[in-house]
C-alpha cells in the first residue's frame, strides 16, 4: 500500500551550492531535482516536497563550448512582431542570476506548482548570502558523482 505524506508532515531543508566554475546545465539539473523534491523517498509529483537551494558566486558560472556567445534565448512580448532575442553573455552582463534561473525554470514542469517551487531557489552574486541563519547543508559539486545528487 502506498503511503501519501500530508502537507503538515513535509519538512524542507536548506542547501548551499558554490557555483564557481560550475557548468550551467549540470548545475541546473541538480538544483531542479532538489527543489522538486526528487531526492527524497517521499516524492509525489503533485505536491511540493522540495528543499531550498542557495547558490552563491553566480558571476563565475561557465558554459561548455561556444554557447556563451552563440546560444539564443527568445521571448515574445505578445504583440505582432514582438519576438526578442538575447544571448547568455548579454544576459550575464545585465543580470548574472537570470541565466541559471532560466535554465532551472525550463527544467521544471509548467504550472502553478513549478512557480511555487522556483521561489525556493535563491541566487546571489558573491560569496555571502542572508540565509546563514537557516544553516544550509553545503553541496560540493566537485565531490558529487554525475549520476548522484544529495540523498537523505
Image: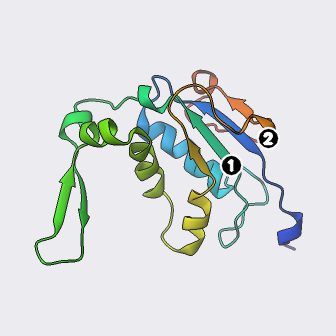
Q: Residue at x 63, y 54 (%)?
A: 120
Give the residue number, with chain letter if any, for mark 2. 134
> Which label was assigned to residue 2?
none
Looking at the image, residue 53 sits to the left or right of residue 78; the answer is right
Q: Determine whether 6 is above or below 53 in the image.
A: below
Q: Residue at x 18, y 77 (%)?
A: 79
Circles 2 and 1: CB atoms closer than 8 Å: yes
Identify which residue, 3 or 37, lies in the foreground: 37
> Which label was assigned to residue 52?
1
Quarter of image, res 114: bottom right
Q: Position of residue 51 (x, y in %)?
A: 71, 51
Looking at the image, residue 152 sits to the left or right of residue 62; the answer is right
Q: Secondary structure at mark 1?
A: strand
Identify which residue, 148 or 32, lies in the foreground: 32
Front position among marks 2 and 1: 2
Q: Secondary structure at mark 2?
A: helix
Looking at the image, residue 41 sits to the left or right of residue 36; the answer is right
Q: Position of residue 4 (x, y in %)?
A: 83, 72
Looking at the image, residue 44 sits to the left or right of residue 7; the answer is left
Q: Position of residue 36 (x, y in %)?
A: 63, 57
State the quadrant of the N terminus.
bottom right
Q: Residue at x 18, y 60 (%)?
A: 84
Dot 2: few (<14), some (14–19), or many (≥20) neighbours within 10 Å? few
Q: Residue at x 61, y 61 (%)?
A: 117
Q: Determine whether 99 is above or below 19 in the image.
A: below
Q: Position of residue 144 (x, y in %)?
A: 62, 28
Identify which residue, 49 or 57, lies in the foreground: 57
Q: Determine whether 101 is above or below 148 in the image.
A: below
Mark 2 and mark 1 lie on one chain; the one further toward the N terminus is 1
Q: Would you say residue 4 is visible in this rendering?
A: no
State the quadrant of the C terminus.
top right
Amino acid at each position: 500500500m502506498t503511503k501519501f505524506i500530508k502537507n503538515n508532515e513535509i519538512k524542507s531543508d536548506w542547501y548551499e551550492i558554490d557555483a564557481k566554475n560550475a557548468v550551467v546545465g549540470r548545475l541546473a539539473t541538480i538544483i531542479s531535482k532538489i527543489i522538486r523534491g526528487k531526492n527524497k523517498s517521499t516524492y509525489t509529483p503533485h505536491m511540493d516536497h522540495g528543499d531550498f537551494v542557495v547558490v552563491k558566486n553566480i558571476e563565475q558560472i561557465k558554459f561548455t563550448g561556444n554557447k556563451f556567445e552563440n546560444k539564443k534565448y527568445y521571448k515574445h512580448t505578445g504583440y505582432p512582431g514582438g519576438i526578442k532575442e538575447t544571448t547568455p553573455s548579454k544576459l550575464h552582463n545585465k543580470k548574472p542570476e537570470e541565466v541559471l534561473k532560466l535554465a532551472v525554470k525550463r527544467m521544471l514542469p509548467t504550472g502553478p506548482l513549478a512557480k511555487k517551487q522556483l521561489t525556493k531557489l535563491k541566487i546571489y552574486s558573491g560569496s555571502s548570502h542572508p540565509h546563514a541563519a537557516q544553516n544550509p547543508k553545503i553541496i560540493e559539486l566537485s565531490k558529487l558523482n554525475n549520476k548522484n545528487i544529495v540523498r537523505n
